[in-house]
Image: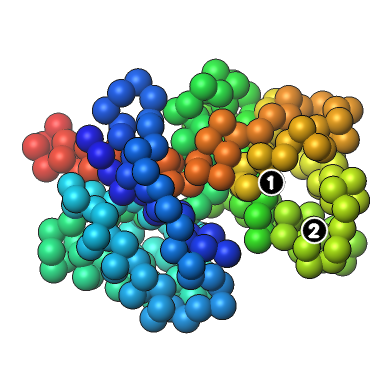
Amino acid sequence: MKILGIDIGGSAIKYGTIDISGSKAEIIDHDVCAVTFSNTPEEYCRALEKLITENAHEKTVGIAFPTVIKHGEPEYVKSPGSRFYSVWPYIYERFCVKDDYSVFCLNDADAAGMAELAGPHQDMMSRGIAILLTLGTGIGSAVFIDGHLLPNSELAYLRMHGRWAEEYAAASVINKEGLTMDEWSDRLHEYLVDLERILNPDTILLGGKISNDFALYRDKLSDLQSVIMPAYYRNDAGIVGAALFAARSLEAKEDHGRGN
């Protein structure tokens, strides 16, 4: 089965066709759409409408939103201040109600974590407390306890030096504040120490584009108590996880319809 996975980020919308028919989800193709947090909700709606119409050939779509979404339903978007408060209900009405698509949505970091849970790091993610962090425009977090997701965690909102943690240690601050990799990795280390004090995780996986450069800051994190590794799917984890979530949600929906 091939499913369209969409991951909405601060600097672009990433999307791709994911083949979930094998033992491991495979990315068949992927691309980006240049819509950023500076765009309006209406522009997001138009961009997503175009992506789904042109790429969801099997009419099943998973969308990872950078906001809290409870139970995956359009009426449970719980971030009224977010631009996505109106986007998901519009997409639901446009495709699920009018054209009989199967579209499912979840938090973006939760999607990335679900991808890692299904990938080669499955054993690590299924044991004890595991955290997936997406380091990009902000910081997304997915927390797993013995392989079970604690949905919609917001570990970006720890306070650090009078700021939210994501304002202090997200990858985006490297360019915003002109930091060197060493300066930024010191901030990341400080943030991870705080997470260890609070949650005592066994494993922390680092995602987002900056995970491609893990070798450049790995040594700065070597004294931490957790196992620290880059995410297997790196910056594509969101689209893979969104597609996996859509597949599982569709299966559950069909089972429910058959009375199983």
The answer to whether residue 217 is seen in the rendering is yes
Give SS at disc 1.
Answer: helix
In the rendered image, residue 123, in percent from the top left (x then y), is placed at 55, 18
**Label 1 CA crowd tier, 10 Å (few <14, some 14–19, many 20+):** some
**Label 2 CA crowd tier, 10 Å (few <14, some 14–19, many 20+):** some
Mark toward the start of the polypeptide (1 vs 2): 2
Q: Residue at x 39, y 25 (%)?
A: 24
In the rendered image, residue 68, in percent from the top left (x then y), is placed at 51, 60
Q: Dividing the picture into quarters, in which one does residue 95 lie?
A: bottom left
> In the rendered view of the protein, which quadrant contains the C terminus?
top left
38 on left or right of 8 = right
Residue 174: numbered disc: 2
Badge 1 vs badge 2, beta-carbon distance below 8 Å: yes
Q: Dividing the picture into quarters, in which one does residue 92 lie?
A: bottom left
Q: Residue at x 33, y 44 (%)?
A: 17
Give SS at disc 2.
Answer: helix
Q: Residue at x 44, y 63 (%)?
A: 33
How far is the residue under mark 1 from the one under mark 2?
10 Å
In the rendered image, residue 45, in percent from the top left (x then y), is placed at 35, 74
Q: Residue at x 58, y 39 (%)?
A: 234
Residue pushed farthest left? 258
Residue 165 vs 84, above or below: the answer is above
100 on left or right of 198 = left
Residue 210: numbered disc: 1
Amino acid, disc 1: Ile
The one nearer the camera, 143 or 53, is 53
> In the rendered view of the protein, which quadrant contains the N terminus?
top left
Residue 120 vs 50, above or below: the answer is above
In the rendered image, residue 83, in percent from the top left (x then y), is placed at 49, 75
235 on left or right of 87 = right
Amino acid, disc 2: Ile
